Amino acid sequence: MNCYIYRSNKQKGMYLYLDEKDNFSKVPKSLLSLLGDMDFTFEFDLSKKRKLVRAEADEVLRIMTENGYFLQMPPPKSDPLKKTN
């Protein structure tokens, strides 16, 4: 599946994956409003074997097939009070 990635200008670290370039019709208007302007970042071929940094490829494929888009959230902020070894 071709996957088109857009970066939110309003929500740092949020990326929207679309199954069709520049086709935001499947994305709820409320979500688009939250994300603000979107900048096209890159495209790639998404398969179950592809390694992704913040998600499992098969889960992204499943969600994109069901919804026509996938929202990648920013990484969790580290807790400054949490001790690390």
Image: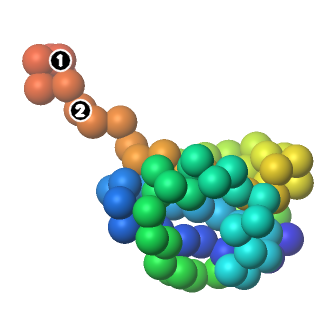
Q: Is residue 28 visible?
A: yes
Residue kind at label 1, given as amino acid type: Lys
* Other-residue count near label 1 (Cα within 10 Å), few / some / many at <14 / 14–19 / ≥20: few
Q: Is residue 51 visible?
A: no
Which quarter of the image is occupied by the N terminus?
bottom right
Disc 1 vs disc 2: Cβ atoms closer than 8 Å? yes
Residue 46 pos. (x, y %): 76, 68
Q: Give the residue at mark 2.
A: 78
What residue is drawn where x is 37% and y is 54%? 11
Residue 59 location, quadrant: top right
Q: Is residue 39 left or right of residue 24?
A: left
The quarter holding residue 22 reads: bottom right
Residue 5 relative to residue 21: left or right: left
Which residue lies under the disc numbered 1? 82
Indicate whether 57 appears above or below 22: above
Which residue occupies the foreground of this view, 25 or 84? 25
